[in-house]
Amino acid sequence: MTYDDQVLVFDADDTLWENNVRFERVVTAFLDWLARPTLDRAEARTIFDDVQRANAGVHGYGTRMFLRSLGDCFERLAERPATDAERREIEQLASSLADRTVELVPGVAETLSELGTRHDLLLLTKGEEREQRDKIDASNLAHHFRAVHVVAEKDPDTYRWLVEHHSLTPESTWMIGNSPRSDVLPARAAGLNAVFVPNESTWVLEHGELDPTDDRVLTLRAFPDLLEHF
């Protein structure tokens, strides 16, 4: 099955480059640091995820929200404020996140180069503006896209705005990403098609249930498989 003259909109984090795996390494180190006989690790992780979910709704996405969540989780588990020394230790655990270098998902650069000869490509990513722009610059992928947008949230209204802003036809526009919650479900709610490219490291807050009967959602095994359909 092939689709001609389509507009392809790409997610960035964990679609074009690995992202969440870096945060997961910090979470693992944080839980190791917290470890004590009375602490159930699975329960601590659930609490951390709940804290992140609440903070994301108020403070958005990115490293600053993540650091806030580490501190808030510590205080919730310890039932007291963190000391200055403990706050410094938490910041040190997350120090690797200051590195803005990116690791591209295998085949991304080559696939985008080929797709760009056939279709109009856009990039739509959510998060903190400067942080996302730094990763885009480090990826050396921006030249593949006619436009790059960094937004606070990717909900149906965001996709409707994108359609209006670029005068897109929803029925011939495809949102491509790894997140059911941010890429597939809201794009479909706005009338776009969607391509789901799973990533085993996808953030738990980005999980969601897809409708297996929805014939306007294409699920692929890996990013380069896009070339077989577009």
Image: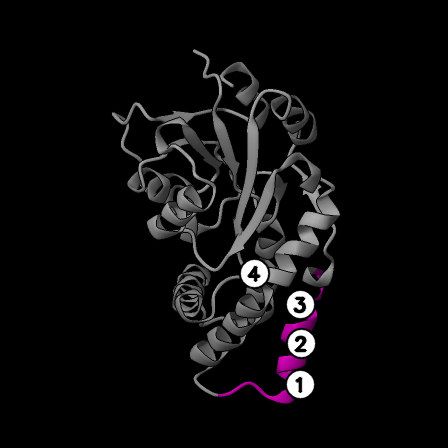
- Separation of disc 2 and disc 1 at Cα? 6 Å
- Separation of disc 2 and disc 4 at Cα? 13 Å
Which residue, given by chain and number where applicable, does mark 3 sit on? Answer: 93
| In the depicted structure, whether residue 111 falls above or below residue 36 | above
- Separation of disc 2 and disc 3 at Cα? 6 Å
Which residue, given by chain and number where applicable, does mark 2 sit on? Answer: 89
Displayed quadrant of residue 82: bottom right
Q: Which residues are magenta?
A: 81-96
Dominant secondary structure (helix, strand or loop) of the stretch shown in magenta: helix
Position of residue 173 measured from the top left corner of the image (x, y, whole percent) = 42, 31
Position of residue 41 measured from the top left corner of the image (x, y, whole percent) = 46, 62
Q: Secondary structure at mark 3?
A: helix
Number of residues whose C-alpha sits closer than 10 Å to that of mark 3, classed few (under 14), some (14–19) or many (20 or more):
some
Badges 1 and 3: C-beta atoms under 8 Å apart?
no
- Which comes sooner in the sequence, label 2 or label 4? 4
Q: Is residue 203 visible?
A: yes
In the foreground, 217 or 87: 217
Horizontally, residue 84 falls left or right of residue 162, namely: right
On residue 85, which mark appears?
1
Q: Is residue 35 visible?
A: no
Number of residues whose C-alpha sits closer than 10 Å to that of mark 2, classed few (under 14), some (14–19) or many (20 or more):
some
Amino acid of disc 4 = Val
Amino acid of disc 3 = Leu
